[in-house]
Image (tube, grey):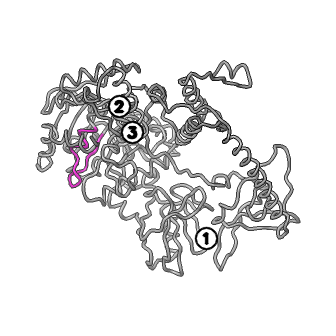
């Protein structure tokens, strides 16, 4: 079974069929969905969603629940790796890092909010927006204001650099040397870098005279260009609390035909009321800093929230409904049982479900975990003299946050992380990061006098940033000092050739001389030394490969059971390291491998896997550590 087949099962249910039928009616409808548990509601919502249908606003009590719900919908609709402009499932967070801490806004959240608002104003077809009361309490600007303050640019368009710069200043964008986060721009001759609040990456706009010659995205970490674009839109921080523009609630911003799904409606009203009190208190304490904007202008009251929700089509779920009795549907569901890692209990439960005509689905977070579970189940069933066909089950690659049993539809959905009691972490956008030799953040952290290494010129001393003219254009460059006070300017477009100097602690390196052959000779000498070492290693490995060693057997179901029981999901590096080690262990010649990593990065988990594999083949394992404390810890 695949996720779309699971959705189809519920699309044929009475509840979803009724919801789909109500979309075409003019009158507002109000439904209650009672008895839902686990991730059944995201499945129902995905089944009730149609690409050509209305917008769905799904309101969960708080951010964590909303984030898990958002991930469930993404996984059900197959949108984990979908480009943002094609996504149908969106997350609408609060502006602040913590609720109502007015001075601590989060640019990542502002970016998400702005993207959602822009998409609602321009997208044709259905959209699912997941949010929570604190985010809905914040008022937003009007669609007219958003449209008015959106700059659209296309390749080949006639537009002057001065006009764009003046407009960015009007938008309150900050001019900086290097663009690293939303709301910033820089100017280097005929090139404008700008980070809009409607895109994950900043734009690099290159002009030829008054014509836009090219538009590209670039990585803020290393300033290197990525993709070419034909057209873009630039939008300012529309959540800026200093804006005097009249605001409206997000619920009045979305179309009147939208369907609002809300868990525990009465609790959501209480949350809005309490948070509005916090906003009023913050207004008194930070009056000057928030520019005299009263909370009424920034936030909705509980009564406003209640009335706005009731002005849309409404589907309530949870246990705290606005009215105790109402039109709706009752589901015969139960949460996923706890097996305490006891596979006998799990098999007994699956057998009981099969006898009751229930189809068991084991939901796995990853393709690798799916293989592990299949191996575990096959071995467990075979060891008990059973066949796979004796248990009505399927293992499905689908990550949901919580399992459930639906007796009406004869379906049990069990998540692997609950079976193995592993921690399941939600994933939402969390910042703008990258991996390169030297990042813009590291440049900002560099102090004049710090040492750096240029791949072509050797060790130099950083002497700050400076604007220089290149082919008639001003551009930012790193100023490096070499021997005899010679100066080298390195363009920000060549940062990949620079790395921070790494040497023995406490020693001061000698500066290289520009134009001399000393650095090239040192590189050549080093390359030759590396070749010599490589030659010795090749000889050593040839001898090792000729030696006879013990070839460990492939993983057993016990190995898979152990690995599946780890609380946290492996990182990609852990997965690769473990696979490499096992591959070496199963070869017939001695293994020679070193696992390196910082403290807390999971080396011991890899060692446990290797040790268990050895013990499973009746070998003893010695764990050597440098201190008594570490010995006790391990």
In depth, the one of 623 and 78 nearer the eye is 623
For marks 1 and 2 on the same chain, the one whose residue lies earlier in the sequence: 1
Label 3: which residue? 67
Question: Looking at the image, is mark 1 or mark 3 nearer the viewer?
Answer: 3
Locate residue 258, reporting x and y percent.
22, 48
Question: Seen in the image, is 608 located left or right of residue 130?
Answer: right
Q: Quick check: is 48 in the magenta stretch? A: yes
Locate residue 560, reporting x and y percent.
46, 29
| Image vertical order of residue 67 relative to residue 517, above or below | above
Label 1: which residue? 188
* Secondary structure found at label 2: strand
Q: Which mark is residue 415?
A: 2
Q: Assess whether mark 2 and mark 1 are in contact (beta carbons under 8 angstroms).
A: no
Tell me the quadrant of the picture where the C terminus can be found. top right
Magenta-colored span? 42-58
For marks 2 and 3 on the same chain, the one whose residue lies earlier in the sequence: 3
Locate residue 578, reporting x and y percent.
55, 37
């Amino acid at each position: 079974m695949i996720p779309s087949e699971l959705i189809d099962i519920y699309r044929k249910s009475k509840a979803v069929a009724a919801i789909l039928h109500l979309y075409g009616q003019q009158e507002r409808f109000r439904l209650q969905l009672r008895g839902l548990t686990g991730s059944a509601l995201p499945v129902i919502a995905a089944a009730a969603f149609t690409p050509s249908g209305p917008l769905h606003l799904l309101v969960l009590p708080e951010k964590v629940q909303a984030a898990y719900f958002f991930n469930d919908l993404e996984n059900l609709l197959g949108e984990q790796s979908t480009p943002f402009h094609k996504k149908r499932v969106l997350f609408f967070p609060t502006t602040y890092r913590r609720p109502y801490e007015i001075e601590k806004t989060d640019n990542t959240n502002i970016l998400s909010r702005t993207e959602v608002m822009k998409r609602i104003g321009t997208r044709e077809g259905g959209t699912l927006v997941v949010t929570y009361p604190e985010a809905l309490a914040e008022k937003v600007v009007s669609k007219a204001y958003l449209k008015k303050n959106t700059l659209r640019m296309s390749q080949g368009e006639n537009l002057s650099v001065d006009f764009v710069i003046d407009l960015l200043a009007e938008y309150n964008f900050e001019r900086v040397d290097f663009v690293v986060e939303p709301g910033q721009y820089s100017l280097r001759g005929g090139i404008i870098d700008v980070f809009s609040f409607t895109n994950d990456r900043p734009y690099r706009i290159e002009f030829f005279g008054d014509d836009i010659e090219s538009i590209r995205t670039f990585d803020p970490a290393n300033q290197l260009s990525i993709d070419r674009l034909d057209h873009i839109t630039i939008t300012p921080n529309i959540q800026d609390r200093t804006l005097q523009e009249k605001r409206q609630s997000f619920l009045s911003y979305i179309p009147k035909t939208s369907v609002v799904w809300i868990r525990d409606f009465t609790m959501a009203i209480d949350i809005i009321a309490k948070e509005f009190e916090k906003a009023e208190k913050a207004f008194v304490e930070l009056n000057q800093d928030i520019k005299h904007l009263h909370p009424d202008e920034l936030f909705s009251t509980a009564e406003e929230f209640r009335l706005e929700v009731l002005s849309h089509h409404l589907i309530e779920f949870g246990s705290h409904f606005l009215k105790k009795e109402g039109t709706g549907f009752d589901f015969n569901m139960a949460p996923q049982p706890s097996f305490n890692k006891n596979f006998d209990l799990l098999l007994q439960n699956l057998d009981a479900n099969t006898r009751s005509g229930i189809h068991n689905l084991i939901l796995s977070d990853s393709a690798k975990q799916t293989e592990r579970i299949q191996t575990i189940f096959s071995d467990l069933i075979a060891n008990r003299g059973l066949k796979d066909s004796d248990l009505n089950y399927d293992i499905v690659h689908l990550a949901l946050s919580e399992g459930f049993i639906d007796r009406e539809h004869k379906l049990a959905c069990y998540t692997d992380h609950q079976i193995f009691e592993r921690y399941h972490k939600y994933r939402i956008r969390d910042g703008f990061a990258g991996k390169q030799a030297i990042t813009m953040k590291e440049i900002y952290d560099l102090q004049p006098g710090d040492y750096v290494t240029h791949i072509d010129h050797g060790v130099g001393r950083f002497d700050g940033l400076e604007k220089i003219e290149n082919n008639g254009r001003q551009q930012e460059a790193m100023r490096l000092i070499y021997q005899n006070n010679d100066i080298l300017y390195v363009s920000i477009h060549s940062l990949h050739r620079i790395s921070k100097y790494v040497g023995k602690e406490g020693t001061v390196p000698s500066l290289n001389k520009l134009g001399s052959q000393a650095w090239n000779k040192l590189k050549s000498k080093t390359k030759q030394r590396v070749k010599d070492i490589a030659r010795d290693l090749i000889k050593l490995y040839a001898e090792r490969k000729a030696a006879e060693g013990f070839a460990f057997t492939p993983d057993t179901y016990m190995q898979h059971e152990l690995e599946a029981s780890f609380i946290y999901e492996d990182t990609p590096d852990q997965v690769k390291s473990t696979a490499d080690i096992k591959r070496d262990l199963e070869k017939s010649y001695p293994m020679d491998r070193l696992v390196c990593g910082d403290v807390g990065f999971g080396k011991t988990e890899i060692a446990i896997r290797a040790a268990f594999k050895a013990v499973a083949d009746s070998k003893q394992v010695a764990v050597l550590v440098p201190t008594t404390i570490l010995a006790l810890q391990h």
